[in-house]
Each structure stands twice: as structure tokens, then as C-alpha cells.
Amino acid sequence: MSCSRRDFLKNTFKTSLATALPLSAFKMLSPAEVKAYTGDPATRWVFLVDTQKCVGCGLCVKACKLENEVPYDPPVTRTWVERYVILKNGQTHIETPLGGNALIESPFGGRDGYIDSKIDGKNIPPDQIAKGFFVPKLCNQCDKPACVQVCPVGATYRTLDGVVLVDRKWCIGCGYCIMACPYGMRFFHPVYKVAEKCTFCYHRITKGMKTACVQACPFEARQIGNLKDPNDPVTKIIMNERVSVLKDEYGTKPQVYYIGLDTNVR
Amino acid sequence: MSVEHLAAQAGEHLVVHGLEWTTKDLFTYPNEFIYWSIQIVMYPYMTGLVAGAFVLSSLYHVFGQQDLKTIARFSLVFSLALLPVAMMPLQFHLQQPLRGMNVMFTPHFTSAIAAFGIVFSTYAVIVLSEIWFVYRKFFVDQIQILKDKEGATDRFKYYLYLLLSLGAFDTTDEALAKDKKAVKILAGIGIPVACFLHGYAGFIFGSVKANALWMSPLMPVIFIMSAVVSGIALCMFTYIIIMEFKKWSAIIAKGKGDESVKMIAGAELDVITKTSRYLLGFLIAAISLELLDLIFRGYTAMKSWDILRSVMYGKDFINIFVLQYTLGNLVPFIMLLIPGLTIRRVFFALIFVLFGVFMMRWNVVIGGQAFSLSFAGYMHYHLPIIPHNLETFKEGLFGALTVAATPFILFWLINKVTPSLEYK
């Protein structure tokens, strides 16, 4: 059999063209794109936290752990409550890196409630305290989520109704999303060994229920709503009152709105 | 809170990734741990060595630096030995190592890691084909020698070289000239690809906007420069060891009365001196960029500077200014500049350089996680030394040593097929 170089190149070209054409009929989709088609585009889930109402009971953290099967004792959690105590005289009992006058703590995410007046194991005389408050934290379900951007395999994605989810079957566990989140929301699930995060209890809210933490909160410090519905009470508050978000300087466009945020909150 | 206390709370069977080696100080978010540990220090270190080794070999092939001829072939083969090792730390680090291939199946291109598989494979193809062109004549020669030999080993070697030659037996001058041209082109393409491979590792860190220490557009360039520094240093280091070992074993054999042994010169000071000049050049570039980054951060003093300063000048002072800049950069810099260079002095300077680049990687990766995202607390990393489960092995001292030892084992194997030190 003789095959000149010319024939060889010719046939190679033909074969590759013949195989490439039928293949080009398919569109390459990343798993993130496929998965992101879940959700109702007429909804945009948002969260409202009224820090004035939070008493630091920790029921939301407990409820979240039980509802979402996040192991109870390991010190990782999808949501948590921070306690801030601001001192009058500017003196600190605990040296903070800023040399400021704020004492902050969140032991086990505040799961067991702040039932002791000791802060980080230290007694602070009440007359030295200027103010004290609690700040619940949860995933901000950002409009421009840094965690979704950096996932190398597209295992984490944003649904059409604005919630960022993780595909436990596809996540490789590289931890890049954990590094990328400015809020420190993500962690590795101790059982599944993949990235884990707050989902606004997506399995509940899409069935018309409230999130576990909203349901557990006795003081309505936590509320969930649909920003695309102008009659939603949460939307009304966000639109009509003065609210703020955490760390907007990172440009991730967070969607958890706060009432009564203090400048010391970080 | 102490590690023991946290671990006790964590329960026995559940492993919280990072809890084992992290201690926290002041206020940190509950989920914050040192998630990227020793293997992520090893990853840019090993990739850097690959890139640096390749650039060194290209200096001869592309720019015709004749004085680098001896070390060029060696560093090319050595960069092949280092190549698979750049992947190893990532595999060790993944929580789901078996899914590592997903990056190739569904690359998500907004992620800096997603293109890793593609950049890495491109680079591997370039290195492999360059080696093939360099060694093609050798393969054909071996086939001629082994053709009529009997014996299982020789037959095996014969078929191995037959396979490696890919059926290209033409060793006329014309064909060899073509080989040479191909090597030149491949080495030429290889330089930007090698730099890209590594600059890109820098981009992985530099683009993390949540991390105040990492986020810098200079990061990729800093990584490339220090990569070339460490790559050249490792090649020189290994070259010196091997050549001196050969020299001494020849001397010992002669001493035992084996007159057939030829005397070997050992490492040539000339080669080493020339190579160390390139090393110095890249070292200056690397240090200048790092200092620029540091000065800029201090001068602009953004929100994060308070905590960065307390980490750099306080907790990590020894690591950064004593071990990295002084011992790893300044000391070898002076050692290489003092006139009357000797092999022994270069050898020790190289150890310091390699250590310095390692400390730079350490200070970036671990240092970047030494403070909380809240800027109100610190985290400390405790390298697991004695492993008591798979995780503390993989992400501990022995995991790192496994990664560090592998290129030498691979080189020993590859060098059996494509001898890079004897064949001229």
C-alpha cells in the first residue's frame, strides 16, 4: 500500500472534519450551568437580620445544625452569632490587633447561648461597658459570589433564585471556595468531605417553608423574603428603611441585609 | 481556645479539616482554620522548580549559551522528573482525591485552578517532545548497538528504544540539523509556557480578593522570578552532588587498583560560575519585587495593614525577615558575590537559596492564613510531624518529604533511559 504525504494529510484533514462536525452539534455545558437552571427566576431570596432584636440565645445555630445535619459538636457551623462588647474607656482587657476597645467572641458559633456575663472567660465590670450586642451571621448569597467564580470544576453554583449551592457529588475538596469567601462562611463537611455552606435551607424555602433559623428565632431577629416581590414585608423594610450589608468593599454584592449594624462589626 | 479543647469537642470519629493543626488566638470566625497547609506550600515550590529547571536548559538551547551546555541537558531531563511531582501535592491535599480528574472533565474557566490541567499538559508535551528530539540520535545509536545482542535485559532495552524512537531512524546530518532546529523552537515556546505555568500558580493566590496578604497583581511575577531562582539552584545543587559523587567513586575505584577507571573532573567550576550569574540576576529581580510589594502595602496602609503589619513584624518576623530575607536571600547573595568562588561555597549558597525560596512559599501560604478574615484574631499553624491518621500523614511532614523525594527517584529512573550526564 502506498500513501504519499499529500494523501496522508488530505485524509487526516477529511477524517478530523468528519468527526468534528457531528460533535459541534453539541454544546459544552459546565455542571454549574446545568445545575444553575434550578430555581424560579421570579424569586430572589434575601435575608434580613435585625441586630437590635437578637438576644444571643443561640437557638438559630442549634436549629440549623439539626436541620442541615451539620455534626453538632465539631466547631464548624453554617450560621453563627457573634457577641460584641464595646468598652467605655478605650482600654482593652484583651489586646485586639487593632488596639481598639471591642471584645468579640463566638464560642461554638454561639450555639449554646450567651448565658454568662464573662466575655472570653474574663469578667468585665458592667460600668466599663459602653454597649453590647449580638450579630447573627449566615451566607450572604452574594450576587457576585467569589466562591462560585473560583470553583475549578463548577461544583458550586448560583440558582436562578439567587442561592449558592454545592454539588456534593462533584466537589473535589480543593478548598479554593473556602479561601475565596470574604465572610468565612464555608468549611469542609466533617462527614461528606466536601465544601459546605448555608443554603438558606433551600430544601425548605422552595417548598414554601421558612428556614430553620428563622423558624427557631423567638424574636424575629431573622427574616427571609423575596426581593422581587414588592409586597413582601422583608422587601418593604429593605426598600424603605436604612439597612446595610457586611463587607461590601469586596464587590460580591451580599444579599443579607442588616438593621443596626455597628462600625465594630466585622 | 486550645487545640485539645476543640479536638475533644470535635468527637473522635469526625475529622474537621484543619482543626488538627490550627490554634486560634483572639477573635476568628468559627469556620476559619488553616485549610491550605504544607502541601499547598509544596505545590508552588515544586512547580517553581519545574519551571526554573526548564528555563535553565532553554538558556542553552535558545540563546546558545555555550557555557551552559553540560548542565542544559541535565536540567531538561531533571525538569521531566520534577513534572509529575508538581501534581502530587494537589492530589495529597484534595479532600476528594479520586475526583481530581473532574478538573479535566468540566473545567470551570472563571477559576484560576481550572486551566491547570490544560497548561500543565501543554507544558508536559513540550518537555517530552524536546527530550525526544534531543535524544533521538541516542535512541537510534542504542538500537544499532543492541540489535544483535542476546539476553533478556538487552532485548528489553532494544524494544524500549525501538518504541521510543517512534520509527524515526534517520541519522543523516540533514535529519540531525532538523532535530536541532526543532529543539530550539520547542525550547523557545517552552520558556513562556514554563513561566506561564508558574506565574499562573502565583495568580491562583494573587487573585484571592478575600485574602489581604495574597491579593496583589505582583504575585504572579514574584512567583516566576523566585521559581527560576529555585529551579536554577536545584539544578546546580543536584549537578554538583552527582558530578562530585562520580569523581569520588572514580578516585576510590582507582585507589582500589582498578586502572580501567577514567578520571572524572567533577563539577566544573566554570559551568557553576556562569550559572550562578544567572541565578544572581533572577534573585535580584525576585527580591526587588517582594520588597516593592512590602513597601507599597506599608505606604498605602489599607484597612488590612494593621493586622498584616502585626503578622509580618510580630508573629512571623523570624520566618520572614530572618529565615527568608536574611538567611535565604542576603547570605547566599553575598556568598555568590565574593570573588574567588569555590564549588563548596556555591554548594552552601545553593542550600540557602533553596531554603529561602521554600520559606517564601511558606510565608505566603501559611502567612496568608495566619490572621483571621475578621482582622481581629490570629491562627497558628502546627505542622503535624508524627502522623496518626491518613490526613496527618498527607498534610504533615512525611507527606511533604514524600513529595520532595519523588523527583530524585524519578530522575534516577528516567536517567537510566536517557542518560543526561555521561552522554555527549
Image (cartoon, coloured by chain):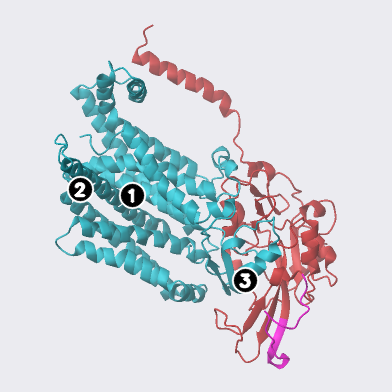
Q: Is residue A48 magenta?
A: no
Identify the residue at horizontal 53%, vertical 54% (top origin): B395
Question: Vertically, is B250 above or below B331?
Answer: above
Q: Which residues are magenta?
A: A112-132
User: Disc 1 vs disc 2: Cβ atoms closer than 8 Å?
Assistant: no
Classed neighbour count for the residue bearing mark 3: other residues with Cα under 10 Å, few (<14), some (14–19), many (≥20): few
Please name whichever residue, B136 or B387, is drawn nearer the observer in this view of the structure.
B387
Residue B160 vs residue B362: left or right? left
Work out whether residue B9 or residue A140 is closer to the camera in this orientation and state it.
Answer: B9
User: Can you say whether B103 is above or below B224 in the image?
Assistant: above
Chain A shown in which color? red
Do circles 1 and 3 both sit on a common chain? yes
| Dominant secondary structure (helix, strand or loop) of the stretch shown in magenta | loop
The location of residue B366, given as percent across then percent down, is: 49, 63
Helix, strand or loop for disc 2: loop
**Is A89 located above or below residue B383 in the figure?**
below
Quadrant of the image containing the C terminus of chain B: top left
Mark seen at residue B400 = none
Asked if the magenta segment contains residue A119, the reply would be: yes
Amino acid residing under circle 3: Ser
- Mark 1, other Cα within 10 Å: few <14 / some 14–19 / many ≥20: many
Q: Which chain is cyan?
A: B
Whole-angstrom CA distance, mark 1 to mark 3, is 41 Å
In the picture of the structure, the residue carrying the numbered disc 2 is B267
Q: Which numbered disc flags the more N-terminal residue, 1 or 3?
A: 3
From the top left corner, tell me how far across and down residue B97 is, in percent.
57, 44
Residue of label 1: B52
Element at label 3: loop
Q: Amino acid at mark 1?
A: Gly
- Front residue of A215 and B384: B384
On the image, the x and y values in percent for residue B370 come to: 52, 68
